Image (tube, rainbow, N blue to C red):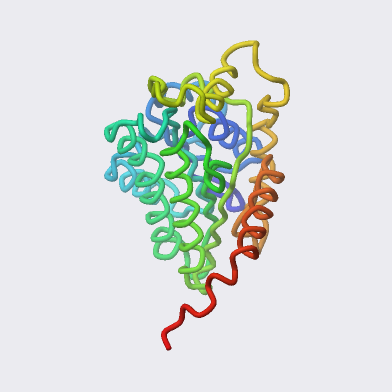
Amino acid sequence: MSATARVWMITGASSGLGLDMTRHVLQQGDIAVATVRKPEVLNHLKAQYGDSLLVLKVDVSVHQDIIEAFKKVQEVFGRLDVVVSNAGYNVLGEIEGTTDEAARAMFEVNFWGATHVLQESVRFMREVNPPGKGGRIIQITSGAGIVGYPACGFYSASKHAMEGLAETLAKEVDPAWNIKVTIITLGGFRTNAVSTGMVKLPPHPAYANSASAASRRAILATLTDKMDPSLQMTGSTAKAAGVLYRLSELPSPPVRLALNCVQLARDMIAEFSKELEEYASWSEGLNVD
């Protein structure tokens, strides 16, 4: 292993951004630890890159799997420079029509799984890496983590939760540890997320003429050739991987980075600012006399 090669851990590496991130890291001459539920899906990369790629079978909804993965990294490499917490999936369904079982199962992956990855990342970078060496933690979220998206309410809730947790973590870490946390808010990227990474629940009949019905149609249209061109997923995950690699090299990276959803973020900020100022006076006189 080259002394200059960085060691990366990437969760959810079987497809989409996780796969392209793994591929990009290897192409740069770094070491990739790719966690997937089915290790055989990365056999082609393992054959190409050999010992530069460590593939681990991990279900992020199983806490012990995550603990064991970090132990394996310590055993094999003795250090960890960058973690990309990317594993997650969506549940398509109105809030009223989503079962507790479906919502809880998704939260086990999107929230608790990602949370355990963050916890282990900080511990490893503080206690296993040399003092002050630190590392970079990149938490992948979604535009649905800053704006509620009809028919994806629980998915949006899981991403809002991770945005808040990761932002808090970025403030909690001692600067002396040199651990930098960045939240990546993703817009529309061309992946198989809708076809294979989404649980699709039956539509609730009461919402047939609602915004959630329109949202559902738009999402499912990505599986056909009938999609409105204005709604096309235009982002390239391969290009996004290059951006994240560049981000990992910054000595002082931003806490938040919006990729392919800059206008969405601007619109959200503008709408919130407008309502904030419009009703600011309602806070007047609320302090205890």
Relative to 228, 181 lies left or right: left
Which residue sits at x=29%, y=40%?
A: 62
User: Is residue 99 shown above or below 274?
Assistant: above
Relative to 252, 223 lies left or right: left
Q: Is residue 132 visible?
A: yes
Find residue 236 and report its image quarter. top right
User: Is residue 288 shown above or below 173?
Assistant: below
Q: Where does the image place residue 231, in percent across and percent down from the top left?
A: 67, 26
Q: Quadrant of the N terminus?
A: top right
Q: Nearer the viewer, residue 16 or 108?
A: 108
Q: Nearer the viewer, residue 150 or 281?
A: 281
Which residue sits at x=65%, y=35%?
A: 27
How many discs appear? 0
Which residue sits at x=31%, y=35%?
A: 105
Question: Residue farthest to the top?
Answer: 225
Q: Where does the image place residue 46, in percent across and percent down from the top left?
A: 50, 27
Q: Where does the image place residue 219, in percent across and percent down from the top left?
A: 55, 24
